[in-house]
Image (cartoon, rainbow, N blue to C red):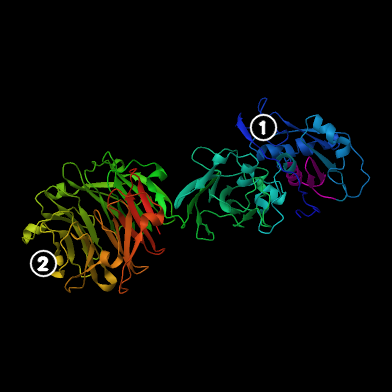
Amino acid sequence: MFGPIQLGGCVRGFHRHIRVVGRFAGLVYDPIRCAGLWASTGPPHVPHRCSSTVRPSHRQRVLFDPDPTTKADRSLRAYINAASSGQADLDAVVLPMQTVDAQDVPPDVLEGQLGSQLRAQGFDAAAIVMLGGLGAGTNRGFWSRFVMVEGVGVWAMEFMHSLTGFADLYPFGGNMGAFDEMACSCGVHPSAYTKAAIGWLDPSAIARHTGRTAGYDLHSVGLIQPPPTGRATAVRVGSQVPYLMVEARQKVDQFDARIPCEGVIVYRVQTSNPLGWAQNQTAPVQLLTTAALQPGASFTADGGLNVRVTGGLSGGFSVRIDDPAKHLVDRSAEFGTPPASGPPTACVVPGLGADNICYRDTSGRLHELWRDAQGATGTTNLTDNAQAPKAAGNPFAYVDTARNTVILLYHSGDGVVRSLYWSTGAVGADNLSGTAGAPKAAGDPVGYYTATADTHHVIYRTGDGHLHELNWVGIAPVSYGGNLTAAISAPKAAGQPSAFVNAAGANIVTYRGTNNHILSLYWTDGPSGLDDLSGFARTPPAAGDPVAYYTAHDDTHHVIYAGADGHIWELVWPGVAPASGWDLTGSSGAPKPAGALAAYYSAGTNTHHVIYRSANGRLHEIWWTPGSGTPQHTDLTDFAAAPLAVDRPSAFTIEGPNTQHVAYRGPSNHIYEVIW
């Protein structure tokens, strides 16, 4: 039952499939007369013919029925035209009044008398309009019946049964209510699902959410369709029934003025029937957000899928959809960013709840792929924004946590070490080695920030294999810190260094020496020191560059490297204790690495992670909990159904949600992100 005067609802028994045959001033369909669609012949707005046994003085209910207050046309014809975005029209013919001697009049009571005649004349639907008495809006195929006092919603629902064959959505609990005409008979617009099912909305207007995370600009359903370029009328999440639909609703006209509230709604489609008929005694469409979501609000469905309204638009809303069941995002495809020419770098800005993936394109420009605390993503051409020189190598990112600023280090083609820096605004650029009068770089620089001293440190290798430092305090000018290896006659570097600071304020630079030992340089305020880490721990010679990090909660230093034996080793030492090593590959049974590694610690899960690429391009993870014994191995390519990697990955964790992220370059030169 629906509406205070409804007694019987709609009688089912009429089902019509509609076939698309072409386009003409919008969608063009088979000439199913009165199907609520354009006819396939004739000019636009050729009306469909429907008859009704209603007095001529009541034609206004069908053709023009202005609201006494707003003067807006609330007629049946106006509703059909608005709900179909002009794709449908009615040509109502009023026949002489008939007298039926019955208390409860069936909708097809005149079928024997008039049915064949009306069909022969080209009518597609007919209605008996009762001047009063028992009964309520109901339908039986070609025929509908309603009472004069009933609103346009009842008339429209019954005619839509006749014209489209679409089912009732109201007989089940949790239905769409006043967000779909076929659930409330209250004269509102049908949902995007219903409009698409009956041909009043092109399926291309409904976006398909297939990846992990994406943003969409929604065009309100009650506005003229199709939506403008760059917008979608709705988003479908899921390829099979049941699936979710996300759409925007606003009080945009005299019909959707009756929706309960404006915002974004989420509902679940639970039938595979093309015209909304229920299956398995389950509501065909179930509304999940009884109150529409406002900007800043979010909804989480079963399974963790999250829909967040990120903002309002003129005529709609912006939303962000995150599906934790999906573990792969093509970050390049999301905004059509240029192809990458090398591996990405990544960092997290804790103070902003944001994370950044940066990479160099084939022209040498540096790009940012960002994600904010609400999950919204975007991209910036950093080089063009800062009007900075192009990069000749791969960039390295770290964070100034005092200012929530990303520092992106790189060297240009002339060997000058440079930086780009930004927070949420414009991008700045610095000529670091040029300003400091330091030697030119032959390798990619790395850097880190010391919060307690508000100092920045940049380490890089010159062509002769020596390691050099640049440093500055806060936003003061950069200074040259000297030749680190030459100052203490340390072995030269054979590759890229890794560097960090510990809780005691000691600066530590680890690197692979020309003797293939893993070495560390360290200093505070006094002279530098040198440790032969792998030599002391008696671990194998290095076949690649180390990656290092520090865990403050247990004052422990971690250095990960690929050994000449094809295994991945960790060198670890707490405080100032001697280093010891252990075989991560042998313990986990993981494949051998090919290329540089990525490693980090996730405090929220108390787990260590090493991410790397094997020779066949597959991505792998070795992870362990401190003190738990045997490390575990995961094939991330299998796990995420991800494309192969062509070079080293970058990896990070986001504390709070405790998600793990791996960014890498795939064979298409797209930047992909694996998330779990």
The reply to whether residue 524 is visible in this rendering is: no
Q: Please, is residue 311 above or below residue 501 in the view? A: above
Q: Please, is residue 670 above or below residue 349 in the view? A: above
| Residue closest to the far top | 42
Q: Mark 2 points at which residue?
A: 526
Disc 1 or 2, which lies upstream in sequence? 1
Answer few, some or many: residues within 10 Å of disc 2's Cα (few below 14, many 20 plus, some between 14 and 19): few
Quadrant for residue 30, please give it. top right
Expressed as whole percent of the image width and height from the top left, the position of residue 517 reads: 13, 61
The reply to whether residue 124 is visible in this rendering is: yes
Of residue 354 and residue 334, the one placed in the foreground of this image is 334
Answer few, some or many: residues within 10 Å of disc 1's Cα (few below 14, many 20 plus, some between 14 and 19): some
163 vs 503, left or right, is right
In the structure shown, which secondary structural element does the residue marked by tag 1 occupy? loop
Q: Please, is residue 503 above or below residue 647 in the view? A: below
Residue type highlighted by circle 1: Asp
The total of numbered circles placed on residues is 2
- Measuring 33% from the left and 47% from the top, which residue is drawn there? 666
In the structure shown, which secondary structural element does the residue marked by tag 2 occupy? loop
674 vs 306, left or right, is left
18 vs 418, left or right, is right
Q: Does the magenta stretch include residue 582?
A: no
Span shown in magenta: 135-159
